[in-house]
Amino acid sequence: MSRLTSAFRNLKKKKAKAFIAFITAGFPSLAATAKLIPELEKAGADIIELGVPFSDPMADGPIIQYASQEALKKGVTLDKILSLVKKARMHTDIPICLMTYYNPVLSFGEERFVKKAVSAGVDGLILPDLPPEEGALLRKAADTHGLDIISFIAPTTPPERLRFIARAARGFIYYLSLTGVTGPRQGIAGDLASNVRRIKKVTHKPVCVGFGVSSRAQVAGIQKSSDGVIVGSAIVRKIREYKDDPLLAAKVAQFVRSLKGRSA
């Protein structure tokens, strides 16, 4: 059983919902990322999503774009991120997903990437620019070696395509709470709960909601109808705020606790 499947099963037994924390790998440094992973786990994150810095992040808003550019300036690469995950695996069993784009994976070599990612301890792969009809070689390698490729469903996805994507999904389904790019929003879409219910009618796979989530009220509201919530830009914004602070990891972890409604 994969770490992702095990995590969702354990949460279901406890009648709890997943909290997925996104951070940009290498921002403000790879050393800081290495410290953030265990601190976020202690703060209550159930899954870590590591964003791979990319020069043209089409799904990311300005907060994550800035973090990616800063990481790229410091020479952060896919190889270095995989090495970071491998070292993190010496101390944690938390599921770790990589969020990247297809071009870095293609350049790396699809099967080579999958093998190296699984060997390092990566559990899932999130590719916003790879539709489920494409990337047959990558998907075959991922299925062979046990890497879950997580699929997206949007508010605009029609019913027939929704069913197709749900069948192709591995690990969990990433439901976009809104159209557009990542970034904090003031509220959540009024049709979110009904759209999540629509997805859950055609699949037993966990459905987690991301994009625009930035407050405790939003987290709590989304978790009522979904299997989990993904928070990215709001956490990366905190990392930027404290990037020069020696207590960066602890302060960001406290922010995650506040989103989960936990005390210190």
Image (cartoon, rainbow, N blue to C red):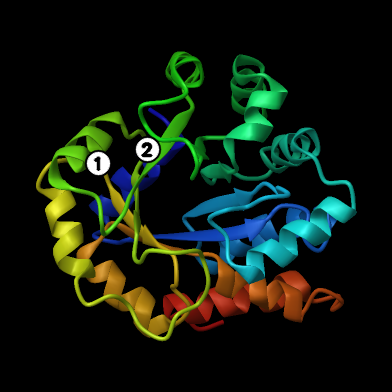
The quarter of the image holding the N terminus is top left
Q: Which mark is residue 160?
A: none
Q: Callout 1 environment at 10 Å: few (<14), some (14 to 19), or many (20+)?
A: some
Quadrant assignment, res 243: bottom right
- Could you tell me which residue is drawn at 31 percent across and 54 percent down? 154
Look at label 2 and name its amino acid.
Gly
Left or right: 33 as drawn, with respect to 185: right
Q: Is residue 124 above or below residue 137?
A: below
Whether 192 is drawn above or below 216: the answer is above
Dot 2: few (<14), some (14–19), or many (≥20) neighbours within 10 Å? Answer: many
Percent from the top left, x then y, of residue 123?
52, 35
Looking at the image, is mark 2 or mark 1 earlier in the sequence?
A: 2
Query: Looking at numbered disc 1 in the image, what kind of residue is underneath it?
Result: Lys
Q: Secondary structure at mark 2?
A: loop
Instruction: Residue 96: give x, y in percent of width and height.
Output: 56, 44
Whether the residues at callouts 2 and 1 have beta carbons within 8 Å, the answer is yes
174, above or below 235, in the image: above
Tag count in the figure?
Answer: 2
Residue 171's disc is: 2
Q: Is residue 204 visible?
A: no
Q: Residue at x 45, y 21 (%)?
A: 139
Q: Residue at x 55, y 52 (%)?
A: 48
Q: Which mark is residue 205?
A: 1
Judge from the rendering whether residue 180 lies leftward or rightward of residue 96; answer left or right: left
Where residue 39 sits in the image (x, y, percent)?
Answer: 65, 63
Quadrant position of residue 84? top right
Looking at the image, is 39 positioned above or below residue 77? below
Q: CA distance from mark 2 to mark 1?
A: 7 Å
Q: Quadrant of the C terminus?
A: bottom right
Q: Nearer the viewer, residue 24 or 206?
A: 24
